[in-house]
Image (cartoon, rainbow, N blue to C red):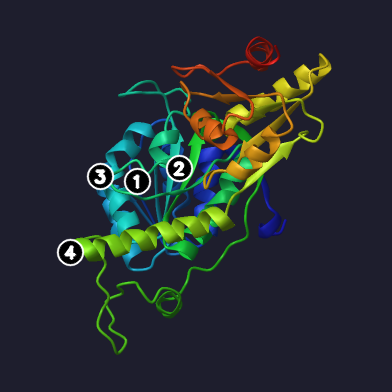
Amino acid sequence: MDMAEEVVLMKGNEAIAHAAIRCGADGYFGYPITPQSEVLETLAELKPWETTGMVVLQAESEVASINMVYGGAGSGKMVMTSSSSPGVSLMQEGVSYLAGAELPCLIVNVMRGGPGLGTIQPSQADYFQTTKGGGHGDYRLITLAPASVQEMADFVGLAFDLAFKYRNPAVILADGVIGQMMEKVVLPPQRPRRTEEEIIAQCPWATTGRAHGRRPNIITSLELRPEAMEVNNLRFQAKYKQIEENEVRFEEIQCDDADYLIVAFGSMARIGQKAMELAREQGIRVGILRPITLWPFPTHAIARLADRVKGILVTELNAGQMVEDVRLAVDGKVKVEHFGRLGGIVPDPDEIVEALQSKICQ
């Protein structure tokens, strides 16, 4: 079978690792933590340093791994890390530095329950941490939310493309269900890793150790002059506005005739789709909007649907985070309620139908 059309059965975490190699990534720096350890384990098993030259390194900590990403990204390389919720919390200073230095990279977060060490079971409670920046300063992270193993594979290349297009860190924000579940996946074709000459041509801002007839670039997020720092921040905000205008992605399912709307991402969108089918069997016309980019958020799409539906139920594996962005999008046009489970408990579709009936369909 042709490598470009290879269909295999694997976990979501494993798909991340395979896709990273095939997308031509230069380096992975990470530290094991459940439920995403298979990313590093799979990379170690595949040994891409022997085939593509990709560096794979288990760092001594999450703090070390994100700073290794900073170094690799500063030289124009396609570099990434992966972790789960507590580990990503440890990375936040480095993530803010990456955003401040406008360095492209990929960060994969396979969420588990918290706060604190919490549980190794699935969660979606890192929504605020990722979409609102997480670390210090006014910055944003391009955030993709996969709902299948196929999207875990597909979003690696997309995340790198967006990160380099806008010189901004990108995140694949998955939950433990998507990371651990097994499905068929079509792996992407193998991309060649870029040569040093291609990196220099594509990333003129990078520090490569070669002056090329000019002063070497300095990669930093430090600016001691307040006026200059304000100019930097205004430039960042203009870039974020451009991303919001051009990169919103979402999926609508049976929304054309819907009286009610479910808004959900990741594994909850899959459960919500089954709940939609059950509700329609009972005569309740429900549609689903699934944000694919959690930032930029599909604000305008939700606002448009709010003009037509009677109520919106936001379902998440948390106490209510994305629901705030939905309410901002709706701006009081229609009733918005939240249904979530905490502590790593994943609800049945019947529970969502009951929440629709009790909270929205009244």
Residue at 34% x, 23% y is: 115
For residue 39, the mark is 2
Q: Is residue 263 visible?
A: yes
Of label 2 and label 3, which has the lower sequence position?
2
For residue 63, the mark is 3
Q: Are marks 2 and 1 in contact (CB under 8 Å)?
A: yes
Q: Which residue is mark 1?
A: 30
Image depth: mark 1 or mark 3 in front? 3
Of label 1 and label 3, which has the lower sequence position?
1
- Looking at the image, residue 286 sits to the left or right of residue 352; the answer is right
Residue 15 percent coordinates (x, y): 55, 45
Residue type marked 1 = Gly
The residue nearer to you, when weighing 69 against 237, is: 237
Q: Rounded to the nearest whole Å, what is the CA distance between mark 1 and mark 4?
A: 34 Å
Q: Rounded to the nearest whole Å, what is the CA distance between mark 2 and mark 3?
A: 18 Å
The residue nearer to you, when weighing 302 against 178, is: 302
Q: Which residue is mark 4?
A: 225
